[in-house]
Amino acid sequence: MKPTLSPQGQAAQTISRNMKLISHNELAGFGGIGEGINMQVTKDGRRILWLAHESAPKNFTAVDVSDVKNPKVICQTDLPHERVRSNSLDVVGDIMVVAYQTKKVGDKPAGMDIFDISTPEKPKLISHFDASGPHSRGAHCVWFVDGEYVHLTSGSGDFEPTHENDFQFYRIIDVRNPSKPVEVGRWHYPGTHKGDKEAPPPRHPRFDGGYRPHNVNVFPERPDRAYVAYLDGGAVILDISDKSNPKMITNWRYSPPYNGFCHTVMPLLGRDLLLVTDECTKDDGIDWPKLGWVVNASVETNLVPMSTLPMPPAENFIKRGGRFGAHNIHENLPGPASYRSNTLVVGTFFNGGVRAFDTSNPYQPQEIAYYVPGAPKLSPKGSIQLNDVWVDENGLVYTVDRFAGGLYIIEMSA
Amino acid sequence: MLDALSRKFPVSVVTGFLGSGKTTLINKLLKRPDMNRVAVIVNEFGEQAIDNDLVEVSSEQMMLLNNGCLCCVLRGDLQETLRDLFVKRRNGDIIDFTRVIIETTGLADPAPVMQTLMTDDMLAEHYRLDCVVTLADAVNGLEQLGTMQEPVKQAALADRIVITKSDLAGEEATAKLEEKLRALNPQAPIKRAVNGEIDLAFLIDVGLRDMKGKLEDIQRWIGEPDEHGDHHRHDEKVKSFCLRFAEPMTWQAFSQTMEVLSALRGSDMLRVKGLVNVAGHPGPMVVQGVQHLFHPPVELAAWPSDDRSTRIVFITRDIPRDTVANLFTAIGAVTATA
């Protein structure tokens, strides 16, 4: 290889700014993690990071991170077959919920498991919430922060979409009795369910990502609101003061002209702002730009974008291989081991690594730190593909690779 | 969450008299295994700029060295070069450097280089001055100090002084030079280097690296205690002294004092650095200035010891200690000087 001014070559080179690697764990060779990260503090004081795998064969992995310099895998479970993935999980106390999404409609298991993780080495299944059906691929994402309701992105046996890409919708599941989870409410984008009086929504002309909810944010501070990212449908705010009858308050649609796949809508509580992220879903910059948006939500019915999170030049990172662009952010979950800030935003950007932004001035968010690991060994994309991130209450950053790299624990500006 | 100091790249300014061996010193430094992620800014890629055996690949403006360092020629102005380095690093175009060394020309006044880091918002956000190293050549240094302005200023502004070629000059000449340098700048520790060999620890991590405010870090930054006393040097135009005030002062009083000094005698206030006990603040305020310009103050997390007195080192041209001390009293910053 011809030497360049960037000595190790682009994708192989770790680059960082105000972030330092504390430790790295390849998760026993199964280093591909989806978008479920949550930290449990056990009754005996251990800190356990739970990770949902991106795809089979593994289901979820528990890592004891009590000593962050020396993380240890203490539990790693298998899926029943290769046609299902878990992808998403959440933890409240000693209860963990895990999503299951199948590759094809009609397959099982599809839905959600509830586990007792009081002994993290031996998770005990409490119940399974079945969401399978002839038009369902099960659940993609869970949001569970209050110990009472799971806000689920899922299909169901009785839901027939108007378009094959619109197979999931928003469901509220009461898990106050974890052995008997029951649905108490649901909402779908108008026109996506057969029999709707509304016409089906228009398809994205270049990238039909579909009309499905991705992440749903519901905070104890604002229990009457669900902030839903609805892929090509953009950002949706629902009034869920009556859980049995969610009502749409607003919908900010920005694709086209943008390239769809709205992924997360997170309120910056107390500031009348939303942080909205897209998901990059294509390699090699095909669907660039995929951005993080700062949105003025002071008038809920008229969401107005103010700025985007500053990114390094796309052309440089696209060359590194795989995806480059926005994806998950740390979602300020309540809980004893979660960092909460309404100004600092930490997100993953696939081969753009993990990046931290100060949004104190919402018109000019500043990038204050980043860490881009060099390509993991055996990376199928030839580059790092950071997929999700958790920030603990001390500000330590836990980020995961989508395919091979496993877990990276990072300190900000030590 | 981010430490206002540790998040910045340390910048060392290597200055020195003509022929004092700056290039030799930098080449020696770059050969050390622990200096493998440094971006060096030089004035030109002359024949002697960087040892050829170090160069791995080069473009018109940059060279990658085989130990991983980057050497970059100063084009346009320093401001532009430092901005360009930061952006290229973030873009992944160049190495992930962690430190910058700037080599000035022998005739350079280092003050504008230092001021660049303070006045450009973008640079002040991402870089911090770590150390000004001034090289003085034992063979010609004494004469240069006597006949030229620049070497005097280079020595006065230094955090560290390295005497080179002492083996050629002999002990007597070297000792005379050392005495003269110590008179010009008693706070800056002085060491002798032979063939560019010097303890790296003497030259790096001199500035405050973080806001933790450890005693040893602060002492290292402010410099050696003024044990020689300034009263021996009435004949010197360049004066250096440390003022201490036991009681806290308001930030307004401190900044007014500095404003008056800058307005009246800015060009003669060669360098100011120290800790200020600002009333109502738990930690000391770190202040530093070069001539008219002051760096935005940074508050440390806590005082390093029970001694909470304000301590400020002044290096001035023809401004006596009493003038500065009296001004603090006149403005009402303090009631009496210690």
Image (cartoon, grey):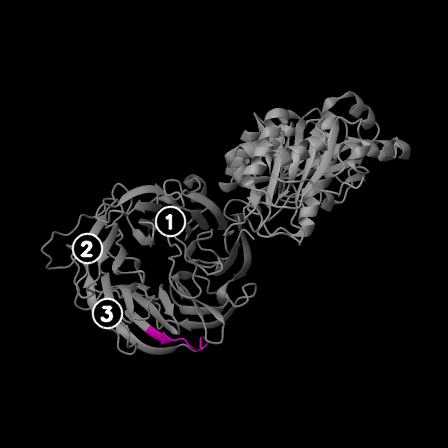
Name above or below for residue A368 compared with residue A192: above
Q: How far apart are marks 1 and 3 (CA)?
A: 30 Å
List the residue tagged with mark 1. A326
Q: Which residue is drawn at 31% across and 49% down?
A: A272
Q: Where is residue B167 in the image (x, y as percent from the top left)?
A: 87, 35
Which segment is the magenta one?
A114-121
Disc 2 marks which residue? A248
Residue B71 falls in which quadrant of the image?
Answer: top right
Which mark, by number, is residue A132? 3
Q: Give the image location of residue B98, x and y in percent.
A: 59, 44
Q: How crowded is mark 2: few (under 14 residues within 10 Å), some or many (20 or more)?
A: some
> In the rendered structure, the residue with mark 3 lies on which chain?
A
Mark 2 → mark 1, Cα distance in angstroms: 26 Å
Q: Which chain carries label 1?
A: A
Q: Report the residue at 72% width, 42% height from top.
A: B223
Residue closest to the eye, B204 or B217: B217
Residue type at numbered disc 3: Ser
- Quarter of the image with the N terminus of chain A in it: top right
User: Counting other residues with Cα less than 10 Å from the Cα at mark 3, is it few (<14), some (14-19), or many (20 or more)?
Assistant: many
Asked whether the residues under marks 1 and 3 belong to the same chain, the reply is: yes
